[in-house]
Image (tube, rainbow, N blue to C red):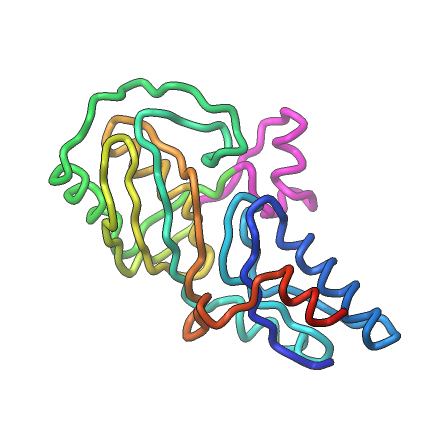
Amino acid sequence: MDDILLIDKPAGMSSFGVVARVRRVLSEKEGKKVKVGHTGTLDPFATGLLIILAGKATKRSNDFLKLNKEYIAEIKLGEVSTTGDPEGEITKSYSDAPKTEEEIKKVVQNFVGDILQKVPAFSAVKINGRRAYELARKGMEVETPMRKVHIYNIEILEYNWPVLKIKTGVSSGTYIRTLGEDIGKKLGTGAYVTALRRTKIDEYEVEDAVLLDDFLRSQS
């Protein structure tokens, strides 16, 4: 089994959890341990395209790490989250005055191009050899770096206060949670990402991916 697998990740599962389940079913089918890895994580609450490499294909992981990505994100304005997503502690923001769509469009377009993002504390980035989220979950203060990323485009798909739905094409390493929070800060409303779906990784599309449960059934 030396393959590139396109998996449509379900919500509520980590990318490492997906890898573990794929590894288990492939290893059982092959009768030996199969090496399996992913090419870029998705947050547990997120869904969508996850590229899984199996067997000798894992040697190609570096070919996939820097590819551009596309996401559809639902952002709730007027509230903030300690993690930037639904898994954190949600509180009413400092301002929940409704914004017009024109105001939204103007602010959103300010993020197109090269921007600096602060890596979220609840992320897999390593700080002194430990994952940032491990430290953050223990209540420790985490100082994360700034990162230069590129936002190719942001399209407003729907807007009905307080919910904003966007589609965006971004460079590798971009945190959509942070983008949502920064849009909220610029609007003066606060915001967090309530739903996130990765739809493309370079030329690979989620429409060509297999639901995780369907893939696991097909291998058993």
Location of residue 92 with respect to 16 vertically, above or below: above
- The structure residue drawn at horizontal position 74% and vertical position 58%, both measured from the top left corner, is 20
Q: Position of residue 130 (x, y in %)?
A: 69, 43
Q: Nearer the viewer, residue 134 or 81?
A: 81
User: Looking at the image, which is closer to me, 144 or 173?
Assistant: 173
Decide whether residue 185 is among the magenta residues. no
Q: Residue at x 51, y 24 (%)?
A: 89
Residue 207 image offset from top left, x and y in percent:
44, 68
Seen in the image, is 162 located left or right of residue 21?
Answer: left
Furthest-right residue in this view:
31
Q: Residue 117, relative to residue 34: is it above or below?
A: above
The relative height of residue 36 versus residue 174 in the rendered view (above or below) is: below
Which quadrant of the rendered structure holds the N terminus?
Answer: bottom right
Rendering coords of residue 191 (x, y %): 35, 32
Indicate left or right for 110 with 3 as reference: left
User: How many numbered marks appear?
Assistant: 0
Q: What's drawn in magenta, residue-wise?
A: 121-146
Q: In screen coordinates, is 135 left or right of 201?
A: right
